[in-house]
Image: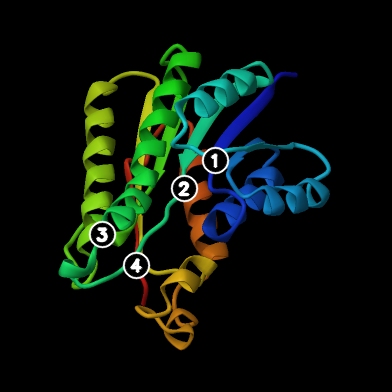
Amino acid sequence: MEKNILIITGGSSGLGLEIVKQAIDKNLYVCNLSRNKQKCEKLDTMFQSNYKNFVGDITDADFVSNSIKEISKLGNISYLINCAEKACFKMPTEYNNSDIDISLAGLKGMILCSTEALKVTNEQNLKIVNIMSSAALKGNKNEALYCATKWGERGYTESLKAAYKGTTVKVIGVYPGGMNTEFWNDNRNYVSEEKSNSFMNPTDVATVILDNITNYKNLNVADIIIERN
């Protein structure tokens, strides 16, 4: 039987890693595109089957193209989950060029991965799941660059929906609130450890996402908004 493949970006930590674990439990073959070689090596020992790493930068068009073409030879690509992101939180006047490049990496990777996945599947029978943030739905203080990036991702997501309406390509936007993950380790000046400990459990968020995208044959959930209590 040919493998049913789920591709995920940023699946080596945080929400992405929780999705990887649960997708494997659902008998999906998971291919993880991640630039963190050390974490990927640990995952190789953790998962003995139904898993493969592709180590590289998702903003590198050649890496993305070559990886997804190789993945397509393993079986049917049924899901692409764009989860990778980086961010910084500052006052509007404090951003620099490096901050912009870091923040836009997730959007660029989302576009490159989606484009290549659509090509290799001949634009058929593919679910593209773009995990963004509640920051894609409203502006937040000290999150100007983060919100700009997430709003861009939302615009790309909505445009994909319009382009593939009525086809077997389904596009799902996911908008979670704050989660208790290592995402915040690089932004402790903005969110303290005490505060992030009160955020949502990424295991729960992963369950909500996978349940909605995998469990129903005759319907498609177009948007998933997951809010903190």
Mark 1 residue crowding within 10 angstroms, few (<14) / some (14–19) / many (20+): many
Q: Amino acid at mark 4?
A: Glu
Specify the label residue 227 is tagged with: 4
The residue drawn where x is 49% and y is 34% is: 80
Mark 3 residue crowding within 10 angstroms, few (<14) / some (14–19) / many (20+): few
Is the residue under label 1 in contact with that under label 2 (CB below 8 Å)? Answer: yes
Q: In terms of depth relative to the viewer, which is nearer, 77 or 189? A: 189
Q: CA distance from mark 3 to mark 1?
A: 29 Å
Task: Report helix, strand or loop for mark 1.
Answer: strand
Q: Amino acid at mark 2?
A: Cys
Q: Examine the image and state in which quarter residue 164 appears.
A: top left
The residue drawn where x is 53% and y is 64% is: 202
Specify the label residue 8 is tagged with: 1
The residue drawn where x is 50% and y is 23% is: 62
User: In the rendering, at what x and y percent does residue 65 appear?
Assistant: 51, 22
Q: Amino acid at mark 3?
A: Asn
**Front tag of 3 and 1:** 3
Dot placed on the residue nearer the N-terminal end, 3 or 1: 1
Q: Examine the image and state in which quarter residue 170 appears.
A: top left
| Residue found at the very far bottom of the displayed protein | 194
Q: In terms of depth relative to the viewer, which is nearer, 94 or 13? A: 94
Q: Amino acid at mark 1?
A: Ile
| Residue found at the very far front of the displayed protein | 97
Q: Which residue has dot 2 on it?
A: 83
In the image, residue 95 sits, relative to residue 229, either above or below, namely above
Q: Is residue 125 visible?
A: yes
Q: Which residue has dot 3 on it?
A: 96
Dot placed on the residue nearer the N-terminal end, 4 or 1: 1
Mark 4 residue crowding within 10 angstroms, few (<14) / some (14–19) / many (20+): some
